[in-house]
Amino acid sequence: MRIFDPHIHMTSRTTDDYEAMYAAGVRAVVEPSFWLGQPRTSPASFRDYFDSLLGWEPFRAAQYGIAHHCTIALNPKEANDPRCVPVLDELPRYLVKDNVVAVGEVGYDSMTPAEDTALAAQLQLAADHGLPALVHTPHRDKLAGLRRTLDVVRESALPPERVLVDHLNETTVKEAKDSGCWLGFSVYPDTKMDEERMVAILRAYGTEQVLVNSAADWGKSDPLKTRKVGDLMLAEGFGEDDVDQVLWRNPVAFYRLSGRLSLDVTGTQATHEGNSILRGVPKDPREPETGPAAPARVPATEA
Amino acid sequence: MTHSRTTPAARTDSTQGTHDDQDRGNAPAQDAQDHAHTGSRAAEDTHSTHSTHGTHTGQSPSGTAPTSSLDDVRRHLTAHLDPAALTWLEHALDEAAAHPGVHGPISVWELRLAEAGRRCGAVYADAARVLILDAARAGTDALTRVYFQGTADERRAVLHALHHLVSGPGALPLVEDALRTNDTRLLTAAVGPYAARHLDPHDWRHAVLKCLFTGVPVDHVADLPRRARGDGELARMLGDYATERTAAGRTVPRTCTASWT
C-alpha cells in the first residue's frame, strides 16, 4: 500500500514517527503551515517556520525515504492577530519556491472580518502564483463555516477544482462535493473523523476527489491513520485500486496542479539506490537499517 | 564510513563492508605519521563509493564539482538538459544578464533562481542556479540576501557559487551559517574551495570534524591534504574523536586513523 499523507504537521513529530510511517507505506507528505499551539508574535517567527518547512524538514523526511512538500500561508487563527498579519506581504517570495505545492492552510477559525480579509487575499495569491489552495474548515459552527468558505471560494479567482476543503465530516461532505472542490477528511483518534465513519462516507459518496489525511500535529493524533483507513477499506470490501486512488492518486493529482510535485526523494540515492517513489508500488518496509543497534539517521548530536 | 549513524553514504559504506580496518574497537593511530597512507587511501575509497552510488549530498554530478569552471558547468548542462529545460535556462540566463541587481520586491533573476528545480530537475538544479547567480553578477550582498531568503536547495547553490563569484572573505558568514546546520547537503557544499581559501584554522578544523561527525565523506572537503599538512591541532582533535568513539564501543572513521602531518 503506497500512501501520500496530504496534510500532516511533521515539524511536531518525531523521527520514530517517520520510521513508522515509512514502514506503513507512507512515501510522500504535504505539511501545511499552521499555528504552533503557542501564538506567534511577529512575522519573523513565521519566516523561521517557513524556512524550516523549506529546509530542515524536507531533509529530515528524506532521511526516512519520504518526499516532503509544504503549503505556505497565514493560518486562520493568527490572521486575527495584527502583529502577525504583515506576514501576508512576505508570502509572495515564498510562494515561488520549488517545494511549495499550495497556498494553505487558509480558511476560517472564528469567522471574523480579519479572517475574511486574509482568506480572500490568499486565494488571490494562489491564483496569482498558479497554485491550488488548501482550505481549512472550522471546527466550531462547521456547516455555517463551510457555506461561508464556499461563498468566498466562488467569489475568488480560483476555480473550485483547484481548491481542497479539508476537515470535512458527515454534515459538510454533501455541500462540499456539490461545490466541485476536492474533499479532505482528517482522521483522528477522538475528534474529527474516525476510520469507520470515513469508510462509510467513501461508500456513500465514492472515492473520486477524496483525500484522507492524519492531520497529525502536536495534539492527540496518529500519523498512521491513513494506513488504518486503507486497511479498513480493504476489510470492508473496497478494492486495492480504490485504496490506491484515495491514499495515493488523488493527493498526487491535487498537488500536481501546482506543477511542482517531485516525488523522487532527492538526496538519498545511496539509501534507496535510486528507487523512485513514482515507479509503482514501493518496496517492502525497510529494515531499520543495520540492526537493532542502529542509531538515528538524522544527526542528533548537536541539536 | 564507520559510524553508520547519519547519512546514506555512511550506511552504504558500512553495508559494503569493504573497509574492515574500521571495525568496532579498532584503536586510533597513536602516531599519526605512521598512518599517513591510510588517509589518502580512505579518501580514494570514499570517492569510489560515492561515485558508484551517486551523490547523497549535493547533486554535484550536475556539474558543480569544485574543480569545474563555469564554462564546464554550462557545457555540461547544454549536453544533458532536455530541450524545454535548456530553453528555459538560456532565457533565464539572458534575463539575469540583462537585469542584474535589485528590482522591486523580487528581481526576475531571483524568481528564476527559486524555480530552477522544477524547471531543470533536481539533478541539474545546483548547476543551473550557479549559472544564474553568475549571469546576474551576484556579489556578496546579493548572495547573502538570496542565501538567507532561500530554500535549502537555493542555499546549497549559493555555497557552490562562492568560489566563482566572491574573491574576498566577505561571504564567510554564509559558510559559517551552513556549518551550524545538521543538514549534510549544506555541510557538504559549505566545505568547498571558498571555505578552504578563507575559513580560519579553528573554524576549518571544526568543519572537518563536523563532516566526520555527521557522516559527510571528507573527500568533499576542498584542499584537505594541503590545509591539513602539518596541522598538529587537527591531528589532536581527530585523535581525541577516535578515542571517544573507541571508549563508547563505536567504530572509528578510518580518516581518524590518518593524518596529513
Image: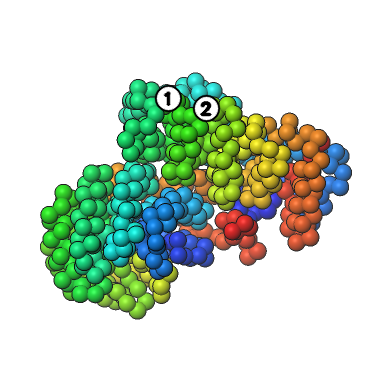
SS category of the residue bearing label 2: helix
Residue of label 1: B135
Chain letter belonging to callout 2: B
Q: Nearer the viewer, residue A225 or A232?
A: A225
Residue A236 visible in image: no
Disc 1 to disc 2, C-alpha distance: 10 Å
Give amino acid for label 2.
Answer: Leu
Position above or below: B95 against A232: above
- Placement of the N terminus of chain A among the 4 image quadrants: bottom left
- Expressed as whole percent of the image width and height from the top left, the position of residue B60 reads 53, 35
- Determine contact: label 1, label 2, CB under 8 Å: no
Rendering quarter of residue A239? bottom left
Q: Relative to residue A222, is residue A92 drawn left or right?
A: left
Please give left or right for residue B27 compared with residue B126 in the image: right
Tell me what residue is drawn at x 26 percent, y 44 percent. Answer: A129
Q: Badge 2 is on which residue?
A: B165
